[in-house]
Image (cartoon, rainbow, N blue to C red):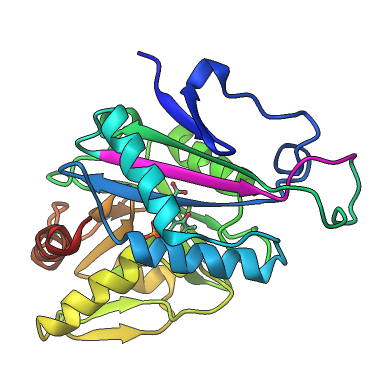
Amino acid sequence: MSRTVYLNGGYMAEESAKVSIFDRGFLLADAVYEVTSVLNGKLLDFDGHMERLKRSLGELDFRFEVNRDELLKVQLELVRLNEIDEGIVYLQITRGVCDRSFKFPDAGVQPTILMFTQHRTALNPADPETGIRVISTEDLRWGRRDIKTVQLLFPSMAKMQAVRAGADDAFLVQDGEVTEGTAYNAYIVTKNGTIVTRQLSTDILHGITRATMLRYAREAQMQVEERPFTIEEAKSAAEAFITSASNYVMPVVEIDGVKLGDGRPGPVSRRLRELYIEESLKTAI
Ligand code: PDD
Protein backbone atom coordinates (compact mmCIF):
# COMPACT_ATOMS: atom_id res chain seq x y z
CA MET A 1 0.00 0.00 0.00
CA SER A 2 1.33 3.42 -0.90
CA ARG A 3 2.01 5.74 2.00
CA THR A 4 1.30 9.40 2.16
CA VAL A 5 4.57 11.20 2.84
CA TYR A 6 5.52 14.83 3.36
CA LEU A 7 8.06 16.75 1.26
CA ASN A 8 8.85 20.47 1.35
CA GLY A 9 5.44 21.65 2.56
CA GLY A 10 3.14 19.18 0.82
CA TYR A 11 1.59 15.76 1.38
CA MET A 12 1.83 13.30 -1.48
CA ALA A 13 1.89 9.59 -2.38
CA GLU A 14 5.35 8.11 -1.79
CA GLU A 15 5.82 7.44 -5.53
CA SER A 16 5.42 11.16 -6.25
CA ALA A 17 7.95 12.36 -3.68
CA LYS A 18 11.13 13.19 -5.63
CA VAL A 19 14.35 14.88 -4.50
CA SER A 20 16.99 16.35 -6.83
CA ILE A 21 20.20 14.42 -7.59
CA PHE A 22 21.96 17.65 -6.51
CA ASP A 23 20.51 17.52 -3.02
CA ARG A 24 23.42 17.75 -0.55
CA GLY A 25 21.78 15.05 1.55
CA PHE A 26 22.19 12.66 -1.39
CA LEU A 27 25.68 13.76 -2.54
CA LEU A 28 27.37 14.57 0.78
CA ALA A 29 25.19 13.10 3.56
CA ASP A 30 24.74 16.75 4.52
CA ALA A 31 21.55 16.07 6.45
CA VAL A 32 20.20 15.43 9.91
CA TYR A 33 17.32 13.23 10.99
CA GLU A 34 15.06 12.20 13.85
CA VAL A 35 13.06 9.04 14.48
CA THR A 36 10.06 9.39 16.79
CA SER A 37 8.13 6.38 18.12
CA VAL A 38 4.42 6.04 17.60
CA LEU A 39 2.58 3.94 20.15
CA ASN A 40 -1.21 3.64 20.31
CA GLY A 41 -1.29 6.24 17.53
CA LYS A 42 0.58 8.78 19.69
CA LEU A 43 4.06 10.29 19.51
CA LEU A 44 6.47 9.46 22.34
CA ASP A 45 8.97 12.09 23.53
CA PHE A 46 8.14 14.45 20.66
CA ASP A 47 9.61 17.50 22.40
CA GLY A 48 12.84 15.70 23.21
CA HIS A 49 13.29 14.87 19.53
CA MET A 50 12.62 18.51 18.57
CA GLU A 51 15.24 19.74 21.04
CA ARG A 52 17.84 17.34 19.67
CA LEU A 53 16.92 18.28 16.10
CA LYS A 54 17.56 21.95 16.92
CA ARG A 55 20.89 21.02 18.45
CA SER A 56 21.97 18.93 15.43
CA LEU A 57 20.99 21.75 13.05
CA GLY A 58 22.83 24.31 15.18
CA GLU A 59 26.03 22.25 15.39
CA LEU A 60 26.12 22.04 11.58
CA ASP A 61 25.16 25.70 10.90
CA PHE A 62 21.96 24.82 9.05
CA ARG A 63 19.70 27.71 8.17
CA PHE A 64 16.47 26.13 9.34
CA GLU A 65 14.13 27.39 12.04
CA VAL A 66 12.38 24.52 13.80
CA ASN A 67 8.69 25.33 14.14
CA ARG A 68 7.69 22.82 16.79
CA ASP A 69 3.94 23.26 16.39
CA GLU A 70 4.05 22.98 12.61
CA LEU A 71 6.22 19.84 12.70
CA LEU A 72 3.93 18.32 15.31
CA LYS A 73 0.91 19.01 13.12
CA VAL A 74 2.57 17.30 10.13
CA GLN A 75 3.69 14.27 12.15
CA LEU A 76 0.23 13.75 13.64
CA GLU A 77 -1.34 14.15 10.22
CA LEU A 78 1.01 11.51 8.75
CA VAL A 79 0.17 9.14 11.61
CA ARG A 80 -3.53 9.69 10.93
CA LEU A 81 -3.36 9.43 7.13
CA ASN A 82 -1.25 6.26 7.26
CA GLU A 83 -3.18 4.71 10.16
CA ILE A 84 -0.09 4.10 12.26
CA ASP A 85 -0.96 2.51 15.55
CA GLU A 86 2.59 1.40 16.32
CA GLY A 87 5.65 2.43 14.35
CA ILE A 88 7.75 5.51 13.77
CA VAL A 89 7.80 8.88 12.07
CA TYR A 90 11.07 9.61 10.25
CA LEU A 91 12.07 13.23 9.67
CA GLN A 92 15.05 14.40 7.61
CA ILE A 93 16.35 17.86 6.81
CA THR A 94 19.11 18.36 4.25
CA ARG A 95 21.03 21.54 3.55
CA GLY A 96 19.26 21.73 0.20
CA VAL A 97 19.92 21.60 -3.52
CA CYS A 98 22.89 23.32 -5.24
CA ASP A 99 25.80 22.45 -7.52
CA ARG A 100 28.19 19.96 -5.88
CA SER A 101 30.74 21.72 -3.71
CA PHE A 102 32.27 21.19 -0.27
CA LYS A 103 31.54 24.83 0.45
CA PHE A 104 28.11 25.40 1.97
CA PRO A 105 25.68 27.11 -0.42
CA ASP A 106 25.08 30.84 -0.06
CA ALA A 107 21.93 32.11 1.62
CA GLY A 108 18.82 31.53 -0.45
CA VAL A 109 19.13 27.77 -0.79
CA GLN A 110 16.12 26.20 0.95
CA PRO A 111 16.72 23.10 3.07
CA THR A 112 14.87 19.98 1.93
CA ILE A 113 12.51 18.60 4.56
CA LEU A 114 10.82 15.25 4.36
CA MET A 115 8.87 13.01 6.70
CA PHE A 116 7.40 9.54 6.36
CA THR A 117 5.95 6.85 8.59
CA GLN A 118 6.80 3.19 9.02
CA HIS A 119 4.58 0.56 10.60
CA ARG A 120 6.27 -1.34 13.41
CA THR A 121 6.16 -4.57 11.39
CA ALA A 122 8.27 -2.93 8.65
CA LEU A 123 11.01 -2.19 11.21
CA ASN A 124 11.66 -5.91 11.86
CA PRO A 125 11.31 -5.41 15.59
CA ALA A 126 13.14 -7.75 17.93
CA ASP A 127 11.13 -9.81 20.39
CA PRO A 128 11.49 -8.44 23.94
CA GLU A 129 10.61 -11.92 25.25
CA THR A 130 13.77 -13.43 23.76
CA GLY A 131 15.98 -10.33 23.60
CA ILE A 132 18.80 -9.82 21.10
CA ARG A 133 22.28 -11.26 20.59
CA VAL A 134 25.11 -8.88 19.76
CA ILE A 135 28.69 -9.10 18.58
CA SER A 136 31.29 -6.43 19.32
CA THR A 137 33.21 -4.56 16.68
CA GLU A 138 35.55 -1.58 16.61
CA ASP A 139 33.81 1.80 16.48
CA LEU A 140 35.12 3.41 13.29
CA ARG A 141 32.61 6.29 13.04
CA TRP A 142 33.54 9.97 12.93
CA GLY A 143 34.12 11.95 16.13
CA ARG A 144 30.81 13.88 16.31
CA ARG A 145 28.40 11.07 17.06
CA ASP A 146 26.36 13.46 19.20
CA ILE A 147 25.00 15.01 15.97
CA LYS A 148 22.27 12.89 14.41
CA THR A 149 23.44 12.91 10.79
CA VAL A 150 22.51 10.51 8.00
CA GLN A 151 26.13 9.31 7.64
CA LEU A 152 25.10 5.78 8.55
CA LEU A 153 27.35 3.65 6.36
CA PHE A 154 29.58 2.39 9.16
CA PRO A 155 26.66 1.43 11.45
CA SER A 156 25.07 -0.30 8.48
CA MET A 157 28.27 -2.28 7.83
CA ALA A 158 28.52 -3.22 11.51
CA LYS A 159 24.90 -4.42 11.42
CA MET A 160 25.70 -6.59 8.38
CA GLN A 161 28.80 -7.98 10.10
CA ALA A 162 26.52 -9.03 12.98
CA VAL A 163 23.92 -10.57 10.70
CA ARG A 164 26.61 -12.53 8.83
CA ALA A 165 27.89 -13.81 12.18
CA GLY A 166 24.38 -15.07 12.99
CA ALA A 167 23.71 -12.34 15.61
CA ASP A 168 21.15 -9.53 15.66
CA ASP A 169 23.30 -6.46 16.06
CA ALA A 170 26.61 -5.01 17.22
CA PHE A 171 28.04 -3.11 20.18
CA LEU A 172 30.67 -0.63 19.02
CA VAL A 173 33.93 -0.57 20.97
CA GLN A 174 36.57 2.14 21.29
CA ASP A 175 39.76 1.52 23.33
CA GLY A 176 38.14 -1.59 24.79
CA GLU A 177 35.09 0.36 26.00
CA VAL A 178 31.57 0.15 24.59
CA THR A 179 30.43 3.46 23.10
CA GLU A 180 26.93 2.46 21.99
CA GLY A 181 25.27 0.21 19.40
CA THR A 182 24.73 0.67 15.68
CA ALA A 183 21.45 2.55 16.30
CA TYR A 184 20.89 2.59 20.06
CA ASN A 185 22.46 3.36 23.41
CA ALA A 186 23.99 0.46 25.35
CA TYR A 187 23.71 -0.50 29.04
CA ILE A 188 24.76 -3.20 31.46
CA VAL A 189 23.34 -4.13 34.84
CA THR A 190 25.94 -5.08 37.45
CA LYS A 191 25.53 -8.04 39.79
CA ASN A 192 24.27 -5.64 42.50
CA GLY A 193 21.61 -4.22 40.18
CA THR A 194 23.23 -0.92 39.17
CA ILE A 195 22.40 0.29 35.66
CA VAL A 196 25.60 1.42 33.91
CA THR A 197 25.77 3.42 30.69
CA ARG A 198 28.45 5.57 29.10
CA GLN A 199 28.26 9.27 30.02
CA LEU A 200 27.21 11.81 27.39
CA SER A 201 29.96 13.27 25.19
CA THR A 202 30.70 13.62 21.49
CA ASP A 203 31.39 9.84 21.47
CA ILE A 204 27.71 8.87 21.49
CA LEU A 205 24.30 10.03 20.40
CA HIS A 206 22.41 11.67 23.25
CA GLY A 207 19.49 9.27 23.05
CA ILE A 208 16.06 10.65 23.82
CA THR A 209 14.90 7.23 25.02
CA ARG A 210 18.06 7.12 27.18
CA ALA A 211 17.24 10.41 28.91
CA THR A 212 13.62 9.47 29.57
CA MET A 213 14.34 5.92 30.68
CA LEU A 214 17.12 7.05 33.07
CA ARG A 215 14.76 9.61 34.59
CA TYR A 216 12.11 6.95 35.21
CA ALA A 217 14.77 4.58 36.63
CA ARG A 218 16.01 7.22 39.08
CA GLU A 219 12.46 8.12 40.08
CA ALA A 220 11.91 4.43 40.81
CA GLN A 221 14.98 4.58 43.15
CA MET A 222 17.08 2.35 40.88
CA GLN A 223 20.85 2.91 40.98
CA VAL A 224 22.34 4.48 37.84
CA GLU A 225 26.02 5.09 37.03
CA GLU A 226 27.01 7.05 33.94
CA ARG A 227 30.53 5.85 33.17
CA PRO A 228 32.36 3.86 30.50
CA PHE A 229 32.29 0.06 30.69
CA THR A 230 34.51 -2.38 28.85
CA ILE A 231 33.29 -5.13 26.58
CA GLU A 232 34.78 -7.62 29.08
CA GLU A 233 32.73 -6.08 31.91
CA ALA A 234 29.65 -6.33 29.68
CA LYS A 235 30.23 -10.04 29.04
CA SER A 236 30.35 -10.77 32.77
CA ALA A 237 27.45 -8.44 33.69
CA ALA A 238 24.18 -9.72 35.14
CA GLU A 239 22.21 -8.15 32.26
CA ALA A 240 22.58 -5.87 29.28
CA PHE A 241 20.06 -3.94 27.24
CA ILE A 242 19.68 -1.21 24.65
CA THR A 243 17.40 1.79 24.18
CA SER A 244 16.16 3.61 21.08
CA ALA A 245 13.00 5.11 19.66
CA SER A 246 12.47 2.02 17.51
CA ASN A 247 13.18 -0.53 20.27
CA TYR A 248 12.14 1.27 23.48
CA VAL A 249 14.10 -0.88 25.99
CA MET A 250 15.31 -4.18 24.52
CA PRO A 251 17.16 -6.88 26.52
CA VAL A 252 20.52 -8.20 25.25
CA VAL A 253 21.01 -11.85 26.13
CA GLU A 254 24.34 -12.68 24.49
CA ILE A 255 27.54 -10.79 23.67
CA ASP A 256 30.15 -12.34 21.34
CA GLY A 257 28.61 -15.76 21.97
CA VAL A 258 28.76 -15.36 25.78
CA LYS A 259 25.37 -15.78 27.43
CA LEU A 260 24.44 -13.28 30.12
CA GLY A 261 22.94 -14.96 33.19
CA ASP A 262 20.66 -17.77 32.06
CA GLY A 263 20.52 -16.38 28.51
CA ARG A 264 17.07 -14.88 28.95
CA PRO A 265 15.98 -11.26 29.43
CA GLY A 266 16.77 -10.23 32.99
CA PRO A 267 14.41 -8.68 35.56
CA VAL A 268 15.91 -5.17 35.48
CA SER A 269 15.68 -4.91 31.67
CA ARG A 270 12.12 -6.24 31.74
CA ARG A 271 11.07 -3.82 34.45
CA LEU A 272 12.65 -0.86 32.65
CA ARG A 273 10.86 -1.76 29.43
CA GLU A 274 7.51 -1.87 31.22
CA LEU A 275 8.26 1.33 33.09
CA TYR A 276 9.33 3.16 29.93
CA ILE A 277 6.27 2.16 27.92
CA GLU A 278 3.81 2.75 30.75
CA GLU A 279 5.18 6.15 31.75
CA SER A 280 5.86 7.42 28.21
CA LEU A 281 2.28 6.74 27.18
CA LYS A 282 1.11 9.10 29.91
CA THR A 283 2.83 12.05 28.23
CA ALA A 284 2.47 10.90 24.59
CA ILE A 285 0.80 13.35 22.22
N1 PDD B 1 18.68 5.49 16.11
N2 PDD B 1 22.65 5.84 19.24
C1 PDD B 1 22.60 5.83 17.90
C2 PDD B 1 23.87 5.71 17.15
C3 PDD B 1 21.36 5.91 17.23
O1 PDD B 1 21.31 5.89 15.89
C4 PDD B 1 20.17 5.99 18.00
C5 PDD B 1 18.82 6.10 17.35
C6 PDD B 1 20.28 5.99 19.41
C7 PDD B 1 19.07 6.08 20.30
O2 PDD B 1 18.51 7.37 20.28
P1 PDD B 1 16.96 7.59 20.55
O3 PDD B 1 16.67 6.97 21.87
O4 PDD B 1 16.81 9.04 20.57
O5 PDD B 1 16.22 6.88 19.44
C8 PDD B 1 21.53 5.93 19.99
C9 PDD B 1 17.44 5.62 15.39
C10 PDD B 1 16.27 5.02 16.09
C11 PDD B 1 17.61 5.12 13.96
O6 PDD B 1 18.63 5.46 13.40
O7 PDD B 1 16.73 4.43 13.43
Q: Which residues are magenta?
A: 87-99
Residue 89: horizontal and vertical position, in percent?
38, 42
Residue 14 shows in this picture = yes
In the displayed structure image, the side of residue 281 where residue 180 appears, left or right = right
Q: Is residue 271 left or right of residue 152?
A: left
Q: In the rendered view of the protein, which quadrant contains the C terminus?
A: bottom left
Seen from this angle, which residue lies furthest top? 1
87 shown above or below 155: above
Is-magenta flag for residue 90?
A: yes
- On screen, residue 176 above or below 44: below
Where on the picture, by quarter, is residue 157? top right
Residue drawn at (66%, 70%) of the image: 59
Give the residue drawn at x 55%, y 48%: 155
Determine the residue positioned at 19% across, 36% down: 85
Instruction: Work out whether residue 118 or residue 167 is closer to the camera in this orientation and state it.
Output: 118
Residue 21 percent across, percent down from the top left: 77, 28
Residue at 33 percent of width and 73 percent of height: 211
| Residue 135 can be seen in this image | no
Image position, residue 218 (x, y; %): 18, 83
Q: Nearer the viewer, residue 95 or 137?
A: 95
As rendered, which of 182 and 200 lies closer to the eye? 200
Residue 183 in the image, given as x and y percentages of width and height: 45, 52
